[in-house]
Each structure stands twice: as structure tokens, then as C-alpha cells.
Amino acid sequence: MSVLPTADVPPQSFTPAPTGCEFRVFRPITTINVIRAVKALPDKQCSSDQFQTRVLKSNIDTLAPFLTELFNRSLSAGAVPTAFKAAYVTPLLKKSDLDPANVQSYRPIANLSVLSKLLERLVAAASRLS
């Protein structure tokens, strides 16, 4: 078994948002917003995602009210569900002529769940309207 090059890297740390950078007021997401956003999702799928995009798209009329409630509660509470924060990180070689044995030749690709991406897109769309 080989040792991962990141085995002895300290855990990542985060700093709080600057003072005054708050998301206190938002326009609630509507069921129509959710349906439109889901229909606009690409058909590709992360193999590790437990919620398949095709299932979401084919059942969006039934699921949209529940997703709308989940997303609005998340925004009003200022908290993203823990499951939405999990990502599968895949190293991708930056350029084909770089040394594949060198860790610095790679860049990380983070694959988030389809629901996490959906929430991000809805928030981004709402912020463009404000």
C-alpha cells in the first residue's frame, strides 16, 4: 500500500466572513424557480452522487415543493445541510506534458451532490435578480 501525498497535511481551516458580510434578507425560492433550475441541469451525473439527476428531473413536479421548503429553510437558518458540503475530490493533471508523479502537476476537481449544485444555482440566480 502506498502512502498518500496528502497524508501528513494539516486539516483545512476556514476564516469567518468579514464583518458586515451577511445574508440576512433573501427573496424566497419558489417552486417554479426549483422546477426551472432542475430542468436546466445538465444530464451528467457524478457516480458517487446518491441522488441521480435523471430521477430528479423525471420527478421534479412531485419533489419541487419539498426541495423548495428545504432550500428556503436552509437560507433562512443560514445553514447548509451537512450532506451538501461533502465533495468527492478527484486530482486532474493540469497539462498532459506535466510529470504525473509530481503532486503539483494536478488540480483538484470537487464533485458536489446534484442538490448542492441546485441550491448554489438558485442562490446565484436570486442574487443576480437583486
Image: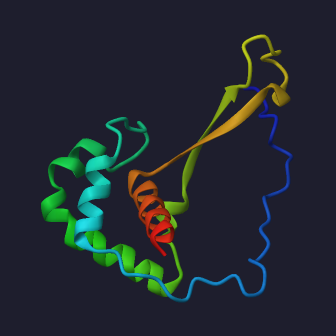
Residue ID at (54%, 56%): 86
Place residue 44 in its image quadrant: top left
In the drawing, does residue 29 fall left or right of residue 107?
left
Query: Front-most of 128 and 79?
Result: 128
Task: Between residue 52 and residue 4, name the one nearer to us.
Answer: 52
Looking at the picture, how far across and down is residue 5, in whole percent? 82, 34
Q: How many marks?
A: 0
Which quarter of the image is occupied by the N terminus? top right
Comparing 85 with 7, the one in front is 85
Q: Position of residue 23 (x, y in %)?
A: 58, 83
At horizontal 78% and vertical 59% (from top left) the residue drawn is: 12
In the figure, is residue 106 to the left or right of 55?
right
Location of residue 91 with respect to 57 vertically, above or below: above
The x, y position of residue 78, in whole percent, is: 53, 82
Residue plotted at (23% across, 60% down): 35
Residue 88 figure quarter: top right
Q: Nearer the viewer, residue 114 or 12?
A: 114
Which residue reaches farthest front?
Answer: 129
Residue at the spot 73% in from the left edge and 34% down from the top edge: 107
Give x and y (percent) for residue 58. Answer: 16, 48
